[in-house]
Image (cartoon, rainbow, N blue to C red):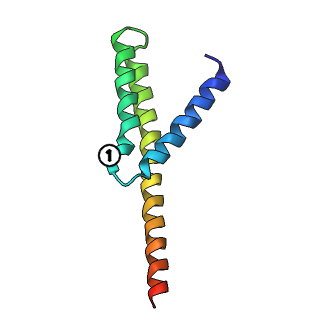
Amino acid sequence: MNEWFQLLLLVVTFGFQYFLAKRDSVYWGFLIPAIFVVTMTYFVLVGQVKVLSALLVVIVGSAFLMEEWFRGRKDLKKERTQELNKMKSQDI
């Protein structure tokens, strides 16, 4: 695969992960990490990737995806707090 396409795919994946993390339901943010782990498990089972390297990729990849999830949840909470403060200030 072309390096530019891989980079684009990575950026789009992280952007979509952030988008899903900002949804009301907490569980949407676990969709992409779950798909990632299942895909890497499939690659190991068919023999396309060695177990040790797949384990390393899953650990590092999941850490980055979960970081995006935490960032999205934090930003959602911040937006809700700002909206609530704006509503309170208009009531006074």
**Is 72 placed above or below 66 here?**
below
**Image point (41%, 21%), residue name:** 54
Q: Position of residue 57 (x, y in %)?
A: 45, 27
* Residue projecting furthest to the right: 4
Quarter-of-image position of residue 62: top left
Q: Outermost residue toward the front? A: 91
- Residue wearing tag 1: 27
> Which residue occupies the foreground of this view, 22 or 51?
22
In this rendering, the answer to whether 25 lies above or below 43 is below
- Residue 19 x, y percent position in the rendering: 48, 47
Q: Quadrant of the N terminus?
A: top right
Mark 1 surroundings within 10 Å by alpha-carbon count, few (fewer than 14), some (14 through 19), many (20 or more): few
Q: Which residue lies at the image location 35% right of the left edge and 17% below the top edge?
A: 42
Residue at figure coordinates x 41%, y 44% from the top left: 66
User: Which residue does the image show at 56% across and 32% down from the upper left?
Assistant: 10
Q: Secondary structure at mark 1?
A: helix
Q: Nearer the viewer, residue 31 or 55?
A: 31
Residue 43, position in %: x, y? 39, 15
